[in-house]
Amino acid sequence: MNSFRDRFQAFLELEASLELRRLGDDPDLFTHLMEADDRWFLDPAMSTFDPSSVAMLTADELAQHKTMLQPRRLFKGILHPHEAYGELASFYTSTLYEHTRYKMRFDTAMCDDQLVIVARYERCPKCLGLGSVDGQPCDFQDLTEGRCDATGWLSSPRGPDQRRLPPATCVERYEAPRERTSLALHEADSG
């Protein structure tokens, strides 16, 4: 799991540095983003790198964004055996700007000795990652974001079926989130 974690941490650092370049209105940003997409994502359509312009932000908003920006917090990693990839490591993180709770899950695998992100998921806004609401399986659906299907995470059309992953072979907890629901997810041996 250490090899996965160390390489994923390098991705998180790169992602934050690219976001800082975006906030600085770097003229070469698009080239850097394309290179990063090709290197880190099995499918660049899953990219978390933001190419949008900061021209609409006021100077105060831009300064606030720069102050709040930090690499995503890495909360937990779970390793699963996987028939196509050998091993699949899922990492649970915050966002770049809000660091108190679980927000994203990245499924990663080793391809040609490089860590590649094979899927990414956002925490379900209805069940908050728990998979159920008032004791009933979560049925949240959004045409652009995906479906929860009682997993707690909005589906990634290109990713492994979350409901069919074999039991974890390793669970590592890193930094603990501060938000109550995220803390319950953090203590669980699943996602």
Image (cartoon, grey):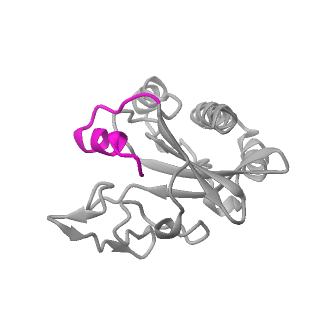
Picture coordinates of residue 76, whole percent (x, y): 47, 38
In the rendered image, which quarter is residue 24 located in? top right
Q: Which residues are magenta?
A: 174-191
Picture coordinates of residue 139, whole percent (x, y): 29, 74
Q: Identify the image quadrant of the N terminus.
A: top right
Q: How many marks?
A: 0
Picture coordinates of residue 148, whole percent (x, y): 37, 68
Q: Is residue 17 left or right of residue 164?
A: right
Picture coordinates of residue 145, whole percent (x, y): 44, 67
Q: Residue at x 72, y 46 (%)?
A: 33
In magenta segment, residue 67 = no
Residue 126 in the image: above or below residue 22: below
Q: Residue at x 79, y 46 (%)?
A: 35
Q: Residue at x 38, y 36 (%)?
A: 98
Q: Is residue 25 left or right of residue 135?
A: right
Front residue of this view, candidates 58 and 37 = 37
Residue at the outermost left position: 134
